[in-house]
Amino acid sequence: MSASKTLFVVNPVSGGKNKTRVVKEIEKNLDPGLFDFDINYTRGPGHASDLTKTAVDNGIEVVVAVGGDGTVNEVATGLVHSNATLGIIPVGSGNGLARHLQIPMNYTKAVQILNESGKTTIDICTANDIPFFNVAGLGYDAIIAHDFAKSEDKGFISYLQSVVAQWFKYRPKKFTIKTEDRKYKTKALLISLANGSQLGNNAYIAPDARIDDGLMDVSILYNFPGLAAPIVAFQLFSKSINRSRYSETLRLSEVTIKQKGKKAHLDGEPFKLGKKIHFKVLPGALNILAPKVYLDERPSEYTLSQPR
């Protein structure tokens, strides 16, 4: 079989990391028998989606996002309901979807893993019809996303500074949650709509979430006293936040949430979606390349090496 026509879409500023070495690793380690590839660089917000849509129109079979969750979101948005397949080399600050898929954070290994990856399908989610692929959020983490977007440095330290700075300013908000069979009001620190299991950096906001079950995990984190912060942080990083006394999880295919403000984040990128947001799952709407270690959990549902 011939090599798949492939485009690498490289975000030169994601994660605050120089991408020159990443590109050299692609050129050095990617199997030319599997991938016939070109490389393009993004020039600003939205450009990755434009590059991807053009590539699909031109018959490209695989588009690999080289960047963080925002870059993955843009590339994947251009691939939804197409025959083309998403690949990921994670070089962002959080890399939530890549971590869920068990793609190595070392870019050399991530390139090598592409040669061994298999094709499968995953669900996508939408917020007022705008796609997201890992986690969307309202409340505290949405405020962090908007603050972090203003920073010139896109590295993890800068993100952590936003987390700390907003912690001393933010107050829990009132939300109205409407599901198929109930409607109620609650006051929460944040609400995460999770397709994947983690926010990034191994912080698991929805430890039991799957990206192929037709459901999203709606993780509600209620306010907690400052003295409990170390415990909550430990639970986030030990995959046990869903067992916290300050947390509740709903598993839904769609939900409508009203909030006081308009801010949200989709895959870590800031959006203003309005006070009323309808979230919905679209099952199996995206083709994706994933490592064998991830795909071995469902060995009858994927094909190896040739992403067609």
Image: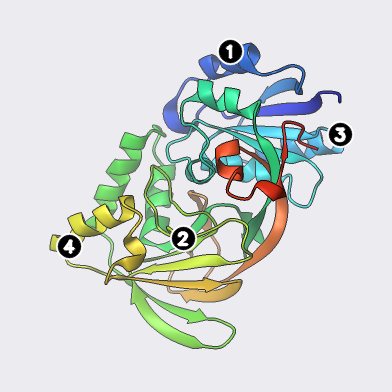
Q: Residues under labels 1 and 2: Cα distance? A: 37 Å
Give the residue number, with chain letter if any, for mark 4. Answer: 228
Q: Is residue 6 left or right of residue 110?
A: right
Determine whether the residue tagged by mark 4 lies in a helix, strand or loop.
helix
Q: Which is more N-terminal, label 4 or label 3?
A: 3
Please determine whether, in this image, residue 16 is positioned above or below residue 134.
Answer: above
Q: Amino acid at mark 3?
A: Gly
Determine whether the residue tagged by mark 1 lies in a helix, strand or loop.
helix
Q: Quadrant of the N terminus?
A: top right
- Specify few, some or many for label 1: CA neighbours under 10 Å numbering under 14, 14-19, or 20 or more: few
Q: Quadrant of the C terminus?
A: top right
Q: Is residue 60 visible?
A: yes
Determine whether the residue tagged by mark 2 lies in a helix, strand or loop.
loop
Determine whether the residue tagged by mark 3 lies in a helix, strand or loop.
loop
Q: Is residue 77 visible?
A: no
Find out whether the residues at labels 4 and 2 contact each other: C-beta distance under 8 Å: no
Give the residue number, with chain letter if any, for mark 2. Answer: 208
- Specify few, some or many for label 2: CA neighbours under 10 Å numbering under 14, 14-19, or 20 or more: some
Q: Residues under labels 3 and 4: Cα distance? A: 53 Å
Marks 1, 2: nearer the viewer: 2
Q: Which is more N-terminal, label 4 or label 1?
A: 1
Q: Give the residue displayed 25% in from the left and 49% down from the top.
A: 165
Q: Nearer the viewer, residue 1 or 204?
A: 1
Q: Amino acid at mark 2?
A: Asp
Q: Residues under labels 4 and 2: Cα distance? A: 23 Å
Give the residue number, with chain letter if any, for mark 3. Answer: 59
Q: Amino acid at mark 4?
A: Ala
Find out whether the residues at labels 1 and 4 contact each other: C-beta distance under 8 Å: no
Q: Residues under labels 1 and 3: Cα distance? A: 25 Å
